[in-house]
Image (spheres, coloured by chain):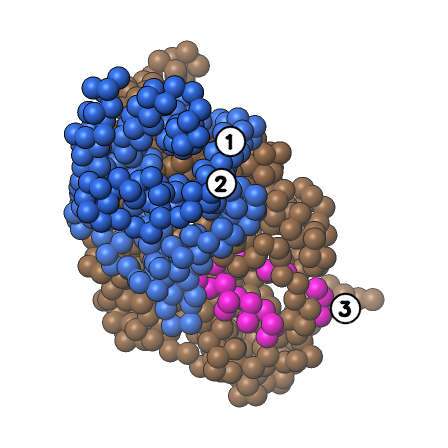
Chain colours: A brown, B blue
Amino acid sequence: MTEPAQKAAEPQPAPVDAAKIQAILKSNQGARMRMWLSICSRCGLCAQSCLFYLAKDQDPKLSPAYKVRASLGRLIRSRGRLSRAELEEVKEVAWGQCTMCRRCTMFCPFGIDIATMIGVARACCNSQGVLPDGLAAAKKNIQESGNQMAMSTEDWIETCEWMAEEYAEETKGVVIPVDKKGAKYMYTVNPREPMYYPQDLGMMAQILTVAGEDWTVPSSGWDCTNLAMFAADAAVAAIPVRNMYQAAQELGVEQILMTECGHAYRSGAFEGPYWLGLPGGKPPVPVKHAVQLFWEYIVRDGRIKIDPAKRLKEPVTIQDPCNQSRNGGLQTMLRELVHALCEDFRDMNPNREYNHCCGGGGGFIPMGSDYKRRRMESGRIKAEQIKATGAKVVIASCHNCFDQINDLNKEYELGVKVVSFKDLIVESMVIPPELVPPPEEEADAAGEDSAQETPDQGGA
Amino acid sequence: MNQLYDFLSGPGAWIAFGVFLVGLALRAAFLVGISRFADKVFWNHADAGWGLRSIGHWLLPLGSRSLRGQPIFGAVVFLFHLCLLGVPVFLLAHNILLEENLGFSFWAMPEALSDWLTVLALACGLFLLVRRLARPEVRILTTAWDYFLLLLTLAPFATGFLAYHQWGDYDLIMVLHLLSAEVLLVVIPFSKLAHVVLFFFSRFFIGSEMGARRQEDGRLGARVW
């Protein structure tokens, strides 16, 4: 098709449905929102909290209160009667200038949940199909396949089997049970893992085997991530959470276990019950984050022992993923775990629930490459924090933080290595003798390999 | 002038206080009412410990990390509010009026003290005004209404000070004093100044939500102060 014909064939985007936007605004006019919209005193204290504001030399247009004015405020004042181009401007504020990390909430004298207000602006834009491409694609995948990367169930199970085989060579008995009824934990992952980093799956299987845990993965409902949450699409966000809860209930497991992911925890443990209208705001099956599991194994119960000789000697710092520390409550467990695994821990400043967002988390990276420049700019704050610690290793127990800090490492030449807890634990855990693969098998395997290799080299 | 003064010191005062008290009460009741079905997240996770600590830390001048980041502002806001609440309630002149008209009164502070506290309130107010003009991240948020509210809040103090010292046209100053105070009282329930009551609700909520909701079997909530 020639270009002009192609352009003519593309459907024209529908006009903005102001009534729909109004409906979303109305449905978000509960007591909290009304109160917040009315009592903001324009004091400007929120500005100092925000990485975007700080990184851009304190540009007042990047203060959280201003961003609310420019997004939600604009939608309210115009009663949703904005053109598509104007909605695109709102999109640039609501998604391009905010990671919904909620640090601003901590700095407001009234405790106004500014990030949540940005979320409502996002919901309005999303209702008109105005949202970052990466999130739109993820939403489509979720709706069509139940997971954000449209990975088929067959591929998922195959990957589990493959990783179990690989890691059974490291630790005897590594198996990834699928759909085992009545297990203690149902393990859910970030689809990034089976798709691109399957070794993550294998390492977790290895750790759970060493701990002698009773666990399983579900054949469906295995994706704990929720990019639809970052798109503020409550209807689509309910899908992966519902799948996950249902799988857990059908299998009759005690708890849902989640990989080292940030926003998955926020979605599954805190927000999910509200999208599904569950009473009490609690998940039907308790949700546990991998960090808490590791803490229980290593720090609390001593179920997995760490070889003191293998504890990391290099200076280490940790990222407090927003959805694990500030919005998750895991900040102290993170630190106790680090002390167990590392000898020289240097905390960032500020830290714990006051730590800065890395700039890439929550779903910012999946928004797409056109947002990379922005997160490299806002991430300068995190880069400076890391530099100031003098650490050579950064532990990032969240996939988005992991990728972002890797990118920051290149951009700002930090000279650090980024690892997850699984990486460290697998390197330093003591594998019980009964689980160490016997050496004869290794020698036999080696012999087989060399026999296969020699035919070409036999002549010399 | 006399008629205006009689109205403002009589029915006007009743209306102003009535609107102030009833307005705030109704607004709070309305919000609590709709929160029952629109803000379940509050009722599910409300926690007195976290809620009260959230309020308490922010009532102190530098009790929060945020205010410690701008300590002069923090101190000024604290003093400003102390004077705002303390001076009108414990002023000798007001208490004499209360005693004469309603038969009860509060403790009355020495007039020298209330005089200095009034000056302090005005100085704090001036600081806030200058800050609003000087700091870019505050200026960009500020509208005419914000400037008006600040000046309206300071007007009763300025006019009260002038009246007490009997500087200028006493009758006019007194009318302005009553008028500005009554307009202020009437505006409070319908503006951001309603934070006089709503501060406690919003702080209690966020303390519970970020703290109690995140706290469970080994996890620790986020301290929003």
Residue at image point 62% right, 85% down: A440
Q: Check residue A318 for magenta coloring.
A: yes
Which kind of residue does numbered mark 1 sit on? Leu
Q: Which residue is drawn at 72% across and 46% down?
A: A413
Q: Position of residue A231 (x, y in %)?
A: 37, 40
Front position among marks 1 and 2: 2
Q: Mark 3 lies on which chain?
A: A
Whether residue A313 sits left or right of residue A268 in the image: it is right
Q: Would you place residue A160 above or below residue A64 in this image? A: below
Residue type beneath disc 3 = Gly
Q: Which residue lies furthest to the top in this view?
A: A4
Q: In this view, does A222 lie above or below A443?
A: above
Q: Mark 1 points at which residue?
A: B126
> Disc 1 to disc 2, how far (Cα)?
15 Å
Q: Is mark 2 on a helix, strand or loop?
A: helix
| Chain letter for the residue marked with disc 1 in the picture | B
Name the spot of residue B34 as percent of width and height, x first. 18, 45
Q: Is residue B32 left or right of residue A427?
A: left
Residue type indicated by callout 2: Trp
Can you tell which of label 3 and label 1 is closer to the viewer? 1
Q: Is residue A383 left or right of residue A109?
A: right
Can I make out residue A146 in this image?
Answer: no
Residue bearing mark 3: A458
Q: Residue at x 55, y 71 (%)?
A: A337
